[in-house]
Structures are given as structure tokens and as C-alpha cells.
Amino acid sequence: MNIRVFRTPSDAGIYAASMLERVITSSERPVIGLATGETVIPVYDALVNFVRCGLNVSHVTTINLDEYVGLAPDHPQSYHQFMDEHLFSRIGIRMQSTHLPNGVAPDLAAECERYNEVIRNHPIDMQVLGIGVNGHIGFNEPSHALITGTHVVNLTPETIAMNARFFSRKEDVPRQAITMGIQSILQAKQIMLLAFGEHKADIIYRALKDGIRTDVPASILQLHKDVTVILDRQSAARLGL
């Protein structure tokens, strides 16, 4: 596991984007696994600048980790809208080359299987991950067991509370999500895990240094052969680096 600590999230975002650029320029049909949330915004901002400076992404396929159940793609808080606002519309990627779960599919079990098929047909070269304060990656929440494939998950109170700041009322926060499973994440050839801020310091320590535990889903990344952890000084505070 490769750990990199930067002065600011912006500096870290440039480094992360440079890793994505290497994947994009070294493959005829690169597949990038994408995440949402505040943590990845510096990465996407930097990648947009790379595209403006000449990086070609016309051959890239993207696969997102998750989507809220019950939010249509045009809902302002859906992850479809997040990706369009922060990345897709800014780099001119072909929308048919982007993949996200459908949170309003009439048959969620069938939607999970459809998404598993998308992942099987597009092996991921680089997976971008954030980490929740409870250790979730994607929306794989702490549990007695970790589910391998795409599935519907009940969000924990901690996750609902953290997401409430994006909604006008707490009762509007979705209670479920569709998420890529742990096995699908681990099958990516390379993984980058990002965390910024002092509120992530404790969970980063637990995920990297406190053994592999199902109540800290991100700790499973210790089993992967090619993980780069990208932190700022605050999130790395407990690592003793």
C-alpha cells in the first residue's frame, strides 16, 4: 500500500488526476471507476484542467460506485447530477460511455444484476474511492458480512446524518442506495483511496492500521495488491508519518 500525504486537498487532487491521466493515456479502452462526494471534487477539477490542456478522454468508459434509491437522474441531489456538474459536462465525455445505477428502476434486484453485467463487461483499470466516517467505501456499510456484488443497502444513521447537509430537510435524505459490491471494487487493477480533513483521521487509522474488519469496510483494501492512499496532513494525523 502506497501512502501519499499532501499539504492541501488541491495538491492531492492534482496528484490523483495525474494517476488517472497515466491510466487514460496507457490504454486503448481505459475504464475508470468513479466516486462522488466532496472529497473527489479536487480530483475532478484537476482532471478537467488536464482535458483543457489537451488530455483526450473520448475513449474512456466510466463506472460509478453508487446511486441513491428513489432519486431520478435529474434530481439535483442524485449522483447522476453530481457527476454531470463536476465532471461529465466539463470534459465532453460521451454519455453512452458513462454508467451509474438507476435509483428509480422498478425492479431493484434486476437493476443490480444489470449493473453487475456492466462491470463484468468493463473491467475497471483504476477505481477512485472516498471513505465514510464509519469506514464505508461506495455505500458498503459496516456489517457482520460484506456483500460481493451490486446490491441495495440500508444506509446507517451516521451516513444519513452526514448526507443531510445536502438536502433541505433531513427527512428528504434517502434511506437506501444501490452500491457496487466489495468484490467488484477489489477486482479493479488499481485503487486510489482519498480522504481529507481531521474528521477522517480516526477512520483512516482504523482502515489502514487496525486489521481487516467487516465493521470497517475500507480495511478490506489491505488485501489489494495496488492501492494508493491520498491524504492531506489532517487526515493523516494519526498515522505517524
Image (cartoon, rainbow, N blue to C red):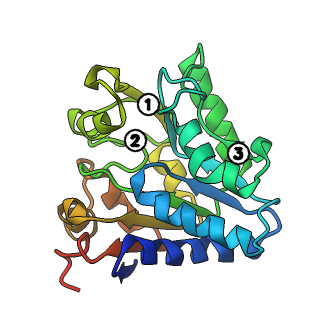
Q: Residue 223 appears in which quarter of the rendering? A: bottom left
Instruction: Compare marks 1 and 2 and give the one earlier in the sequence.
Output: 2
Q: Amino acid at mark 2?
A: Phe
The reply to whether dot 3 and dot 1 touch (C-beta < 8 Å) is no
Q: CA distance from mark 1 to mark 2?
A: 7 Å
Q: Which residue is mark 2?
A: 139
Q: Considering only vertical position in the picture, is 6 above or below 97? A: below
Neighbor class of circle 1 (other Cα within 10 Å; few <14, some 14-19, many 20+) is many
- Residue visible at 51% across and 78% down? 15
Q: Amino acid at mark 3?
A: Thr
The mark found on residue 177 in the picture is: 1
Residue 202 is situated, as x and y percent measured from the top left of the image, at: 17, 63
Residue 72 is situated, as x and y percent measured from the top left of the image, at: 57, 23
Q: Secondary structure at mark 1?
A: strand
**Image quadrant where one finds the N terminus:** bottom left
- Name the foreground residue: 188 vs 200: 200
Q: Secondary structure at mark 3?
A: strand
Q: Amino acid at mark 1?
A: Ala
